[in-house]
Image (cartoon, rainbow, N blue to C red):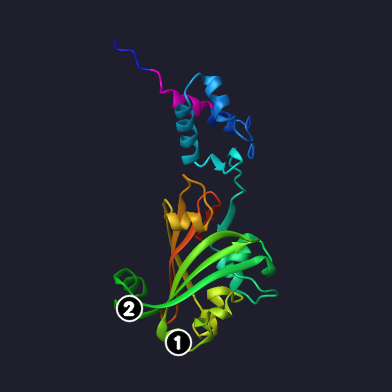
Amino acid sequence: MTPVPDRPAYLRIADTLREAIRDGSLPPGTRLPTIAELCETHGVSEIVVRQAVALLRGEGLVETRRGGGTLVKVIPPARRVAMDRYRAVSRPLAVPETTFTHDQKITWAEYRLDKEFTRVRADDELGALFELPAGTRLLRRRFVFYARGEPQQISVNYLPWDLVADTPVCDPAREPWPGGTLAQLTYLGHPPVRVEESVRARMPTPEEAETLRMSGGVPVLGITRRMLARAGVMEVCREIVLPADRVVLDYAIDL
């Protein structure tokens, strides 16, 4: 019988550190032993230790800071995002809020929005989502959502240009708009009666990871959304991008 070779040293070191992170021996925010200390403890070269640490970094368990060493990553509790938030925000508002501020449980003063508005034409996919011909003129709005100064979400949504042209909705200076897109469509005379979402998991693009200040190895949830009024599809969001370690999506079905 051929003996099974031992696991490579970098995997064994990663196993040891991973177990210490999971059992709490190395709690969040703790600095890992230095490269030199790990080399001495395990009797291996520096390159082996660096491979082990890179593996844990790729799993999203640790992060390396310039001048600060490698730390066990602090992951805040995931916020729960439920479909009924649309219903909550569509009611008359006592104070300004949107679905994002509702999800994040933040005040209007703690909310910030980076925005970029452009006019585009629908590609085949957007045309199918809107149930309109490809080439239809659309307003494209790209938002980066901040809660208490931290970027939490990217959203790229589209509205028919004929619906919003020459209205306050196509003015970026009016953002953020209390009530968000729901309130804007209501203002335009097309209150949404249905919201559809489809969700997929994927790895972030480099630009998304940088914008959302994400650690390596963490996927995102990409949500494609349609808002429908009685006259048809009024808004398509392609996509809402959320770091997967920061949210739990809750869906309820009334039977």
Residue 95 lies in what quarter of the image?
bottom right
In the image, 141 versus 253, the foreground residue is 141
**Amino acid on which the number 2 mark rests in the picture:** Leu
Q: Which mark is residue 165?
A: 1
Q: Main secondary structure of the magenta part?
A: helix
Q: Mark 1: give few (<14), some (14-19) or many (20+) Cα within 10 Å.
A: some
Q: Is residue 10 magenta?
A: yes
Residue lying at the far bottom in this picture: please name it.
Answer: 166
Q: Is residue 237 above or below residue 177?
A: above
Residue occupying the point 46% across, 57% down: 208
Q: Which mark is residue 73?
A: none
Residue 80 lies in what quarter of the image?
bottom right
Q: Is residue 163 magenta?
A: no
In the image, 207 versus 77, the foreground residue is 207
Q: Position of residue 50 (x, y in %)?
A: 48, 32
Q: Mark 2: give few (<14), some (14-19) or many (20+) Cα within 10 Å.
A: some
Left or right, residue 1 beside residue 138: left
For marks 1 and 2, the one nearer the N-term is: 2
Q: Position of residue 191 (x, y in %)?
A: 51, 80
Left or right, residue 246 beside residue 138: right
| Helix, strand or loop at mark 2 | loop
